[in-house]
Amino acid sequence: MNLSSLSGIGNQSLSVTVRDIVAVFFRHKRIMALCFAGIFLGALLSALILPASYRAETKVLVKKERVDPVVSPEQTAPMMLKDSVSEEELNSEVELMGSEDVLRKVVLECGLDQHKSLLTRLGIPQSQATRTAKAIRRLKSDLSVEAIKKSNLISVSYESQDPQLAAKVLDTLNAAYIQKHLEVHHPSGQAQFFEQETERYRKALADTETALKDFDTTLGGVAPQASRDLALQKLADFNSDLHTTQAQIKETETRIANLQKQQGSTDARLTTQMRKGDDPQVLQQLKGTLVTLELKRTELLTKFQPTYPLVVEVDKQIVDTKATLAKEEATPLHEETTDQNPTYGWINSELAKAKADLSGLQAREIATTAIVSQYENNAKQLDEKGITQQDLLRTQKANEENYLLYLKKGEEARIADALDQSNILNVAVMQAPSIPALPSRSPLLLGIVGLVLASVVSLGVGFGLDYMDQSFRTPSEVVGELGIPVLAAVPHHAVARGGVDLYGSDVIGGNGNGFGRAHEDSPMNEEEARPVRLA
């Protein structure tokens, strides 16, 4: 190899060529061949040894043809009308089909719990509950339940070594799912419940009507509300009369007080005539007495001296008589004529009349108060009776409404039960499972899969080993890794193990130093570069 060629090699661009890829095969051909052969033979043996597996399929249609009334305490139940099945409803049916209750029924009816496990074959006993739980877990893993997109269909498939068992499992699953659908969407016992409630409210309605009739009989056929209103009206009238009477009593008492006051300030008699003059009889008597005394004094003076006691006494009597006469003459006699005062008499008569009126008003007040109290008691009793009657009427109405409600609901429940017995449901088996005739796994397909898998794995192993190898194999790798030109490549001939000739060349770097293995391989002559150490 000349220097020009070496210089061209050092300056060529670094790129992966077909020659480099083919070189990987030649470097690791033994390992790649062993991997390919092992995987491919394993796939062929699996196809020949594994038993045939059969897949049974069924499809269930979820629809909205039947609409059940909503159970509610109203006479008219709302109808839930929907034209299409929502995704949530479809997923709910998928989960319902794969529920543990449905799978347990399938396991027990199909005898899947009688499968002999490794522990059973080894002589280790297992309980029935454990075998059933394991059978449910196996069935859940082998069973595929999925909703088909953009449709109302649920696809169910089951794979088993026995084709008849696969079809039987799906048949049992469909029956168990439909039964579970009935239990969930329309629980049993509704008709019996509504019949019991209808009978109970019918008896309650009859008892209420009897009690209401007896209550009306005790009232004499008169409505307590009307009687109460009439009593309240009478009570209002008597209350008005009572208030009027009380006001009149106060007025009469005030009038009596005023009359008594006027009576005290009014004279009982009135002076009708008054005369003023002397009393002639008294004056005449006094004058006669005076004349008698004077005559007596004159007679005594004829016999006695003026100082004689009898004369002095007569003188004194004369003086007294004159004084009395003068006094009588000075105070003339007054004569008055009186008569009964008419004002006083009117006051007395009015006062007597007012007192009589007061007595009558007080008696009237007592009587009216008793009547008012009686009407108040009657009104209270009638009000209580009215409340009792209203309560009986409300109870009667409620019992009647409940009786009609449960009667209607019972009829709806009987209709729903009849639909269930006729299998008129919102789910239907569109495709019944059939016994599969062909296995689900084909030996040819398994061989093709083994071939593809062996090829991919062997290629991956070869390229992986080549990638982890850190030695230099071509001058281009030296240039790409160290960034220096290759000055020379010395061919090297060696005999490898197994008698294979290898040709190579020693490579000398541009810095004059020798370095580790650098060989240029060729798929044609299998050249190999031997490491050279330069001084």
Image: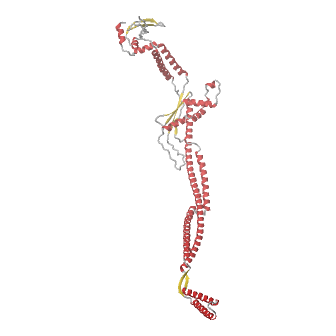
In depth, the one of 285 and 333 nearer the eye is: 285
Looking at the picture, how far across and down is residue 191, in whole percent?
58, 46
Looking at the picture, how far across and down is residue 380, in whole percent?
59, 61
Residue 294: which quarter of the image? bottom right
Q: Residue at coordinates 56% horizontally, 46% vertically from top-left?
A: 413
> Is residue 301 among what the camera can see?
yes
Residue 386: which quarter of the image? bottom right
Q: Residue at coordinates 63% horizontally, 31% vertically from top-left?
A: 128
Report whether 38 appears left or right of 200. Answer: left
Looking at the picture, how far across and down is residue 92, in whole percent?
52, 37
Looking at the picture, how far across and down is residue 430, in whole percent?
51, 36
Residue 160: which quarter of the image? top right
In depth, the one of 338 and 253 nearer the eye is: 338
Q: Residue furthest top?
A: 535
> Is residue 221 among what the camera can see?
no
In depth, the one of 218 and 247 nearer the eye is: 247
Location of residue 125 with respect to 20 vertically, above or below: below
Q: Residue furthest left?
A: 4
Where the C terminus falls, by quadrant? top left
Location of residue 296 with respect to 87 vertically, above or below: below
Location of residue 511 with respect to 180 vertically, above or below: above
Location of residue 71 with respect to 133 vertically, above or below: below
In depth, the one of 177 and 385 nearer the eye is: 385
Where the N terminus falls, by quadrant? top left
Coloring scheme used: secondary structure
Number of numbered discs visible in the structure rendering:
0
